[in-house]
Amino acid sequence: MSYVRDFTDGGMDLKDLLGGKGANLAEMTRMGLPVPPGFTVTTEACRTYLKLGEAPDGLFAEICRHLGDVERAMGRRLGDPDDPLLLSVRSGGKFSMPGMMETILDIGLNDATVEGLAAVSGDDRFAWDCYRRLISMYGSTVAHIPHDLFEQAHAAESDPRRLVAAYKRIFADQTGQEFPQDPQAQLEGAVLAVFRSWNTERARVYRRAEHIPDDLGTAVNIMAMVYGNRGPASGTGVAFTRDPATGARGVYGDYLQNAQGEDVVAGIRDTLPLSRLAELDRRCFDELTAALAALEARYRDLCDVEFTIEEGRLWLLQTRVGKRTAAAAFVIAAQLVDEGVITLDEALLRVDGARLAQLMFPRFDLADAPPPLATGVPASPGAACGRVVFDSRRATETRGPVILVRRETNPDDLPGMLAATGILTSHGGKTSHAAVVARGMGRTCVCGAPIEVDEERREFRAGDVVVAEGDLISVDGATGHVYPGELPVTPSPVVRYFDGAVSADSGPLVSAVARLVGRADAVRRLGVYANADTPEDAARARRFGAAGIGLCRTEHMFLGERRRLVERLIIAQDETEIRAALDALLPLQRADFTRILAAMDGLPVTIRLIDPPLHEFLPSYEDLLGAADDHSRELLTAVRRLRETNPMLGLRGVRLGLLVPGLFAMQVRAIAEAAAERTAAGGRPRPEIMVPLVGDVRELAAVKAEAVQVMEGIFPGIPIGTMIEVPRAALTAGRIASEAEFFSFGTNDLTQMTWGFSRDDVEGSIFPAYLRMGILEESPFETLDQPGIGRLITIAVDEGRRARPDLRIGVCGEHGGDPASIRFFHEAGLDYVSCSPFRVPVACLEAARAALLSPE
Ligand code: ADP
Ligand code: MG
Ligand code: MG
């Protein structure tokens, strides 16, 4: 069994074995780029170590053999007191986990070799500075000494020799042992510490958030050190082949003269823009630019590199396909197509729906923005401005928009979170209570910001700035930045494009999005419909590319002034009173449908008959108890009569239609009359009628029989279908299909009823705990639970189509707009997904990606 591979013996396709960093170091080595010699200990070795609790047999002997090759290549030996070779020992798993695992530099220094390094370099200060870096890095990673102990000593002492003495005392005090002088022992200790860093708490938390499996292990890269801190002709930096923020062409980066790599990241000194390197060292700059071009050609994508210049000689220490903003992802994908590097279909795979959704949120106009007060975890996108409040009560009582600021949130904060436009916390990450709830409710949220929240004094501190209750702040949920004051908000240019307010060639971002979404429409098989209840939403959905309305809810049409009519219906004592109430509602409903059918002329409009329990249209029980007038007393009696312990499982949907005589018939008549009216006016109405909450075919049959009779003579032949949202409907889909002309999965209710999760109750309480405990990886209300709900869907599709081969099948729950779920709907063979108008382009893009990733 071989656990070690030389850099000359690997490549970019070996990420499983060598980790991303190791595979890419090998690739660069094979491309002839200047990489310091070295080798990689495989992830296999790490997995074995973590399983056995000790290094696999023969590992260190193998490392020794490869070390010999490095020593020969460098002409130096590890531990040579005259001219020592020093090593870096770096972590690197298959997927990048920036800063989560350990790296130890300058392995090989001890009391003797430090003198040799000082002599050959002619730089005493440099050599001792490297030694003290080693002791602190080794001390904190291998021996777990708190880092601040070293930092305190550093602040108190500037002479590197005395500092090394102080660090060695700290090491001895904390561990009871002297700092190891044997370079071989240092190397072995460092390798094992990197293995163990795979399993630290923060690494686990990060993997859970990023959905990286826990059993991959990390590789260890061991390579010769090169020094950026050898004087003004040395330095270190990072470089990108294009701007990772905007995607603009041209080499970007930062450079720090006379410094080691970690100084750039630590932000100790101000860096220079990379262009300055061209003036400082033209040759290295040109060599770097050529290397960047070669890397882009090889990886066919934006790359970033870490580099070091040692006395005028360039070394590349790392490369990877670089992270980028959502905007840059679209711009770069389109550029690469223009440059003939990738095809349009490949470009579709370089972007995704989640990023497109990000680009569609309103954003802050940052032109005159002050620097951010703090930057936390961007947990739920959006641009929110408001007055700071520190508790739920103030949030609900304060007029105007508020930002709820808490250390962390809990279920008691729900009313405040609902009242707030934005939520800011100082604790927790992407799976904290605040994050999960805010995403569910569509509130902007930044978590875990480096601020000190003082709920007693009603203020928070960011650095030396104090923000008091009532002060205005702006929270950017896309970047995690928190700004003082109220920043202006502008609609996203992408939305303006879909709305027809700007043309496709109004800038690189809009043009890239337009091209890719255009291509997506040609590639996808899934249809994309919208959920829209008003003519305005319907019109927008159409502009955004919806091929129809998959869900037009009718309950919103009973709010406002029409509530009175519904109240009349509810307190009606006999058939005549019910009739009168319904007769009054009919013309209003007809007008609603006429307008929606007009907005969607020529396209299908799926109208769902009334779904919620009737008491939702009445004032609350508590409010009515206090009221004394006759009408309120009548309502109170009705509320008493209608009260249910589990309203979501009670009198609603088709059950309501069957128990309140004439209610569904009134709606069907309104739809048929609206369609007839549109036809008379020269339009092409295509209404469809959808029955909610069906669990048995006989429920549907009864509604259908009545509906067919009602539309007869007005506008016959309107297709009648059903929601599949009660688990029993999915399980008896074959029978239901004998009556239904189409199915539409209501995945919200289906999830709720299959899991037995009351959505309104669990999202703030059980889910955050379940996510933390690893029982759930995401909310099943956000991303479809494939093993459970997905199975029901598959059963229903199979049985439904067997009973009725031309059955049309779609989904209209919120999952219809969720990127991860759309792939499943494509694979399950659905005809369309229906989602909110804003999600339509996102769904189009994801449907195309699904078609490319799982061709039929
Ligand atoms: P991370 O993944 O956190 O960036 P790295 O393993 O890349 O950790 O290393 C941390 C820092 O040490 C980087 O700035 C890198 O450039 C620097 N570094 C790593 N190896 C060497 C080396 N052989 N010579 C000089 N600097 C190095
Ligand atoms: Mg790095
Ligand atoms: Mg439902």
Image: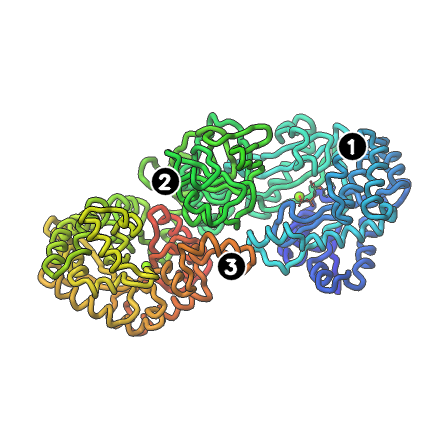
Side of 670 relative to 555 (left or right) = left
User: Gap between marks 3 and 1, in whole Å?
Assistant: 51 Å
What residue is shown at x 22% (from left), y 59% (from top)?
Answer: 688
Q: Are marks 2 and 1 in contact (CB under 8 Å)?
A: no
- Residue 713 seen: yes
Image coords of residue 604 (percent x, y): 24, 55
The secondary structure type at the circle numbered 2 is: helix
Q: By what rule are the colours in the image chosen? A: rainbow
Which quadrant would the N terminus be assigned to in this image? bottom right
The kind of residue tagged 3 is Leu
Looking at the rendered structure, the kind of residue marked 1 is: Arg
Q: Earlier in the sequence, mark 2 or mark 1?
A: 1
Determine which residue is flagged by label 2: 495
Between residues 772 and 598, which one lies in front from this camera angle?
A: 772
Front-most of residues 267 and 90: 267
Residues at marks 3 and 1 touching, judged by CB atoms closer than 8 Å: no
Tell me the kind of residue under disc 2.
Val
Residue 320 x %, y %: 61, 46
Q: Give the labeled residue for mark 3.
A: 776
The CA span between labels 2 and 3 is: 33 Å
Indicate left or right for 413 with 279 as reference. Answer: left
On the image, numbered disc 1 is attached to which residue?
230
* Quadrant assignment for ligand 2: top right
Q: Is mark 2 within 8 Å of ligand 3?
A: no
> Residue, x 24% and y 69% (percent of image)?
699
- Splitting the image into 4 quarters, where does residue 802 fall? bottom left
